Amino acid sequence: LGTWISPVTFIHQYTKRRKLNKAQKGMSRHYHFESNMSLTGSNADYRIPVKPSQQGLIAAALYNRIAKNSGASTISGSSVDVPFLDKAAEALWNARGKSLVVSGSNDPDLQKVVNGINQLLGNYGSTIDLDKPVYYRQGNDQEMSQFIDDVSGGRIDAVIFYNANPVYDHPQGVLLASALEKVPLKISTADRLDETATQCNYVAPDHHYLESWNDAEPQKGHLSLCQPGITPLFNTRQAQSSLLTWSGAPETDYYEYLRTQWKANYFPVTDSGDFETFWNQSLYDGVIDASQAPVTSGDAATETEPVSTEETETEGFNLDISAVASALQSKYSTENSGIELVLYQKVGIGTGSQANNPWLQELPDPITKAVWDNYITVSQKFAREHGLTMVEGKTKIAKLTANGVTVSAPVLIQPGQANGTIGLALGYGRKNAGRVADGLGANAFSLISRSNGTLLYQVTSEVSLEITGESHRIGQTQTHETYMGRETVIQEALLSDYQKDEYAGEFAPKIATWKGDEEKVAPNKVTLWKHHQDKYVNHHWGMSIDLNSCVGCGACTIACQAENNVPVVGRDEVLTRREMHWIRIDRYYSSVGVDDYGALEQAAENPEVTFQPMMCQHCNNAPCETVCPVAATTHSTEGLNQMAYNRCIGTRYCANNCPYKVRRFNWFKYHDNDDFPQNTSMSNSLGRMVLNPDVTVRSRGVMEKCTMCVQRIQAGKLTAKKEGRRPTDQDINTACASACPADAIVFGDMNNSESKISKVLQIAHHDDHKTVEEPRAYTVLQELNVDPNVFYLRKIRNKDEDNA
């Protein structure tokens, strides 16, 4: 769900079976075995921390348990004992043909075992579709290693690096950099003088993809066209045009070349129309299903392979039991007592190719909530045993050695980390990325292991950690880890309880009246407010957030930042609690205590995780509105809490009075202040292209916060008005809801009984009021009676009661 192959696709598919409503009362069950606390593991119903040296044996043990049920041969020498392994095997066997086992490991032998498990479960042709392979992320470790060996051996005369940077992001990058001196001709198409481009004779910068014509086949038979959105900003040339020129066809225009290839390969022979109609329709649709259409003979398109007409290989997988048993025994062991290292990618930074984007650097990591750093993660137990606890907000810096390479990084204590293991993110330590990323963090690519040319991101031997006398402050947007049992913040229940009672897990606080504790009533029964809802005669905008669907990826945070010109402030400002994101993802761990407040603050060693998107709740009884001395924050006739920036004088009373802490104050003019170099690009014409012209850029001394994308609301209303109709869900949506791959966020008009939000919340429309009748819906801090227009749907966990 975080960084593996196609997270957006996987999140969308995964959460489909996690949604609950009147029509769907069941959900998938997710078991997860891992070392680092990952985004995927944090969403699991059962998460089991294990060491990397155990993973191959765990897969084999899982195979054996299922093989015994099916009567198949078992893998010898695969004894391992970890919690819930039997339970996972039983659940998989009971869900034959409706289950799936996947592994993020780069070990081909472990992957063979996983394929064998899916074969025993009858998943091929059911949950695994071999007819629709995807064609991205098809790097070949062995071929790359052979290339580097050939360069070192002086066997390469010329090389073109097509938007690739192996000097930085390959474990043999240092070797490659020195060996490239032996290559007479070296060309890079990078957009800047990155780590690899600086080693080349020539740099022929490629257009940005938004400046280019192109095509692609991301999935077998599904072709897509790319067309430029803007003219080139710099003196660049599309890489494909460069290749055509170097191949001896300098007069060929790439656009015409692309059209010629499509006409030869994908224009249906039986099509009664002309090619122009087909071409324009393909551009309009964005994708065509070439697997269903007869095509003329011809060469392949430039960026794709021709659509295969060969029959798909026989579905299934046959596991060589003896071979894989021998391979696993040589690689994995339950006896390793040393420190083990797991290298991983962060959701925002990935491999570091886009590390110079400050939005990504300031996107809080979903798990650690840290920004602008990579760090060594250790378990709470490991930290106690090695004296790594934080002192006055500072963490210790350690020297990490693996594969004979040493890097230095600060240590971060991570609940859920498998004891005896440490983690470190890739994508940092850039030297030629740009002023935002250069010199930030440690480069971990050189720590990657290699086995027969295959890159292994888990190092199980000769790993050491040396604590230095230095310290470092890691910027984190959230430093409290649990919700301390406050059921007015997070509500959750077990699936078995929910299936018996749709209101399972509900917490409905009561408050005392003048009669005292003898007569307690719902908070909304005692109020000094005149109800705004009675005045919402036109629209009433609201939002629903399903905690069962939200995986915590942070796509909504970046979408909001791009849409609303939210500034980047840098690590030092984050450390002073001045981050500016309008929507944050609160990450809560389960705690070890029940009644002891001290224990309630401590996260469990292997905690359950809940993600909660939090933005301005647009309260109907908004406490911010009552304390503003200049009426800069007001309430609209459509349920929105509004900000008049020109009226705000920066008293910050509203922020102090907000129980959700979602209002942001501009301490500085971030977008053109030299003290914030990551933002100063906005002071020139190129940098300002990132800004949304429909949204005001706020100056210093002004309060800001979520507006429910009021500019989008107004645009949708005007479009509908011009067409003489009422606006619908198709006209208006917020940036966060549009970007959410899990469809966890639903925005709309609660006055419209046909809107999606009305149906999700089961809003009943009465003569003089509306009521929300979805049993899982609740509002945060309900006891305050601020009456938010943002509703949350209770978290449901698919665990057995004895394991809750």
Image: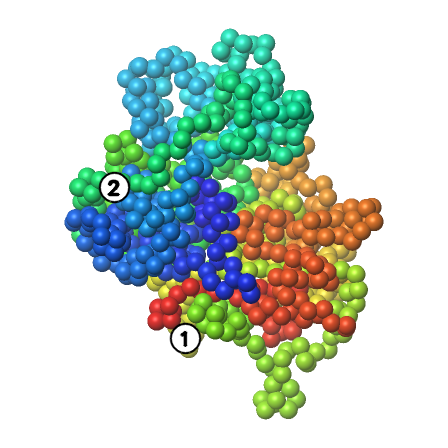
**Residue 396: x and y, percent?**
36, 52
Vertical position of residue 160 compared to residue 547: above or below: above
Relative image position of residue 268 (x, y in whole percent): 58, 25
Under circle 1, the secondary element is: loop
Q: Which residue is mark 1?
A: 594
- Identify whether 504 is placed above or below 551: below
Q: Residue at x 67, y 55 (%)?
A: 708
User: Which one is earlier in the sequence, the residue at label 1 or at label 2?
Assistant: 2
For label 2, the SS is: loop
Q: Are marks 1 and 2 in contact (CB under 8 Å)?
A: no
Q: Residues within 10 Å of mark 1 (few under 14, many from 20)?
A: few
Q: Residue at x 49, y 38 (%)?
A: 355
Q: Nearer the viewer, residue 149 or 429?
A: 149
Q: Amino acid at mark 2?
A: Leu
Which quadrant holds the C terminus? bottom left
Q: Residue at x 19, y 39 (%)?
A: 323
